[in-house]
Each structure stands twice: as structure tokens, then as C-alpha cells.
Amino acid sequence: MRKTLAGIATAGLLAAGLVAAAPRDNPNTTPDNEQVTKLLAETKTIAFQLKEDAVIMESFNRMNVSHETHAAMINQIRDHVNELGKRVAKLNEVKGLASPWQRAAIDRMVPFLDELAGYTTAVIEHLSGTERHTPEEYKDYLEANADYASDLARMIADFVDYGQTKNRLERLSEKLEIPKK
């Protein structure tokens, strides 16, 4: 009887060990969503346009540029920020279908976009006369817009590059018939 109980206990422990050692779904194996990939690529393009305009506008701090030129440039920046907001809203709609790295990209864009919207609004208010800021504050807003736009564009580009590199590596692994872990 003792041997039978010991055998059952050992078999039970072995079975539990096998269940515990069984491979689980790895969240990193969730395939990239094509729609999210496309939206991220579009977002990257808009972010680079925004960065270019924000850097140009920041350079106005070192030049004698008309009020109208400032107004025209901030309108372009506002349009880019609004377009990015629309893309991020679309990305959030399909976030549940995204792979982990795609979800991380979406989540990390939001704080940058919030800051950009705030600084862009401050510049617009200054130029329209609804809020008067000191020349130093205005200069700081332009610098902050350029910095946040540059960081956002770089971050999105890095995520898009990561996705492309990851997909290329997966294709090469299949081609070379490298076993998956």
C-alpha cells in the first residue's frame, strides 16, 4: 500500500511538474497587426512633418520674422498636432488587436501629444493676443514644441524601425528554418 501511495504521489508530482513546465502563450508572440503597422507608419510621417515645422518655428527665435509668418507656421503645427491626435485616436480604437510593442508605442505617444497640444495652444494664445506671455516664455514654448516634436518623431521612428527589424528577423528565421524557443 505504501509503495502504491508513493507511486501515486510521485506520478502526481511529475504530472504537476509537466503541467507547470508546459509552454504557455508568450505575449511577445502576438503577431503584429497590419492595420496598426500602417497607422504607425502614417503617424511617423506626420510626426516628422511636425518636427520639421516646429524646428523651423523655433529658429524664428534667432531671426527677425513677421507676426504673420509666426501665425502661418503655428497654424501648420496645430494642423499636424490635430492630425496626430486623430491617428492616435484610431490607434487606440485598434489597440486591443496590437502586438505588445505596438501597444507600447501607442501608450508612449499620448504624453508627448498632450504636451505638444499644450505648448501649441500657448503659442496660439500668445499670437492671437488672448494670453500675453513674456518674450522669454514665448521663446520657451517654441523650444519646448521643437523638443517634444523631435522626441516624438524619433520615438515613433524607433518603434516603426523595431517592427520592421523584428519582421525581417522572423522572415529570416523561417527561411533558415531556425527553431523557435
Image: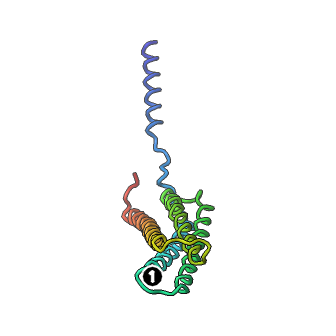
Q: Which amino acid, mark 1? A: Phe
Percent of width and height locating residue 87 = 59, 69
Foreground pick, 139 / 143: 139
Residue at x-position 40% and y-position 81%: 62
Foreground pick, 46 / 32: 46
Foreground pick, 14 / 128: 128
Residue 69 at least partly seen: yes
Residue at x-position 48% and y-position 59%: 101
- Tell me: 122 left or right of 3: right
Q: Is residue 138 above or below residue 10?
A: below
The colour scheme of the drawn protein is: rainbow
- Tell me: 130 left or right of 175: right
Q: Secondary structure at mark 1?
A: helix
Percent of width and height locating residue 50 = 50, 76
Q: Looking at the rendering, which quadrant does residue 38 occupy?
A: bottom right
Foreground pick, 135 / 56: 135
Percent of width and height locating residue 11 = 45, 26
Residue on which the image places disc 1 = 60
Percent of width and height locating residue 8 = 47, 22
Q: Is residue 150 above or below residue 67?
A: above
